[in-house]
């Protein structure tokens, strides 16, 4: 009975995971840093995040997820404006934030993106067999209800992201995570999936005192 009750849940989880276009590739956490509770975490999208028009969306989605976990977080776009850190390196951004009330910075960087062209061959789809398949007319209707789909070229797109968490008091890197996004349907989907992955991974690795 328990197996029968769990089956629908497992199916739903499988479908959700199959629809997810993003995944974590690698993570790193400083071995010498205790779990900390920060007063204000600034989320900064820099150096390439504008190429997909996702900078503000990714920042704000990650901020919202941090707030849900009880953290005081703010988006750099909301605090300093959408162009405050445009075309700046990670190191330059961190230096500009020295002396502010921000005591932790979580960056989002687009490391790389690839685009591969491939050919999808033509296909012929058949309508489902009917109960009259063994009779001439049922067979005739089934075989004539074929759908032809011509071949075409399409592209696979992969985006490689990195997020780093810096402690502004020690100026040290506390945590780093790299992800891959494969053919995301929209910037909204990308921002949502990315934020979920990062928060779940940070919680799993006990990076912040949630």
Image: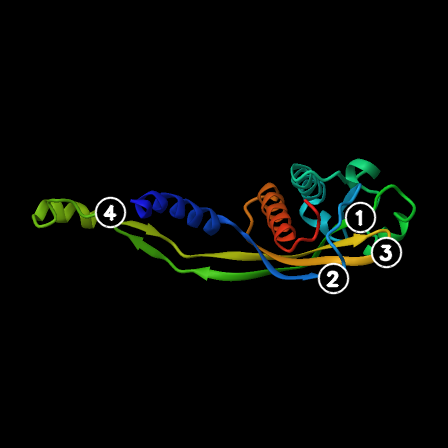
What residue do we see at 82% from left, 58% from top?
172
- The residue that mark 2 highlights is 30
Closer mark to the observer between disc 3 and disc 4? 3
Quadrant location of the N terminus in the rendered image: top left
Q: In the visual, does 155 lie left or right of 50?
A: left
Estimate the spatial distance between the alpha carbons at disc 3 and disc 4, rounded to whole Å: 66 Å
Name the secondary structure under disc 4: loop
Contact, mark 4 vs mark 2 (Cβ under 8 Å): no
Q: In the image, residue 150 lies at what x, y percent?
A: 38, 54
Q: In the image, residue 192 lies at what x, y percent?
A: 60, 43
**Mark 2 or mark 3, earlier in chain:** 2
Marker disc for residue 104 = 1
Quadrant location of the C terminus in the rendered image: top right
What residue do we see at 74% from left, 62% from top?
30
Relative to 192, is 149 above or below?
Answer: below
Q: In the visual, does 94 lie left or right of 107?
A: right
Looking at the image, the residue that sits furthest to the right is 99
- The residue that mark 4 highlights is 127
- The residue that mark 3 highlights is 170
Estimate the spatial distance between the alpha carbons at disc 1 and disc 3, rounded to whole Å: 10 Å
- Give the camera-side residue of 9 and 26: 9
Estimate the spatial distance between the alpha carbons at disc 4 and disc 2, rounded to whole Å: 58 Å
């Amino acid at each position: 009975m328990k197996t029968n009750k769990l089956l629908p849940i497992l199916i739903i989880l499988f479908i959700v995971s199959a629809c997810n276009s993003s995944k974590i590739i690698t993570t790193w956490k400083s071995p010498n840093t205790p779990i900390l509770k920060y007063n204000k975490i600034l989320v900064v999208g820099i150096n390439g995040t504008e190429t997909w028009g996702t900078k503000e969306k990714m920042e704000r989605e990650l901020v919202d997820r941090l707030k849900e976990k009880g953290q005081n977080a703010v988006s750099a776009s909301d605090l300093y404006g959408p162009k405050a850190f445009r075309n700046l390196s990670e190191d330059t951004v961190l230096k500009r934030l020295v002396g502010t009330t921000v005591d932790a910075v979580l960056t989002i960087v687009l490391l790389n993106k690839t685009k591969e062209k491939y050919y999808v061959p033509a296909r012929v789809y058949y309508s489902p067999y009917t109960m009259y398949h063994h009779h001439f007319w049922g067979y005739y209707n089934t075989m004539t209800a074929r759908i032809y789909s011509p071949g075409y070229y399409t592209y696979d797109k992969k985006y490689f992201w990195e997020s780093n968490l810096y402690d502004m008091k020690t100026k040290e890197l506390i945590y780093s995570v790299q992800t891959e996004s494969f053919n995301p349907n929209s910037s909204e989907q990308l921002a949502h999936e990315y934020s979920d992955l990062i928060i779940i991974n940070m919680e799993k690795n006990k990076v912040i005192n949630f």
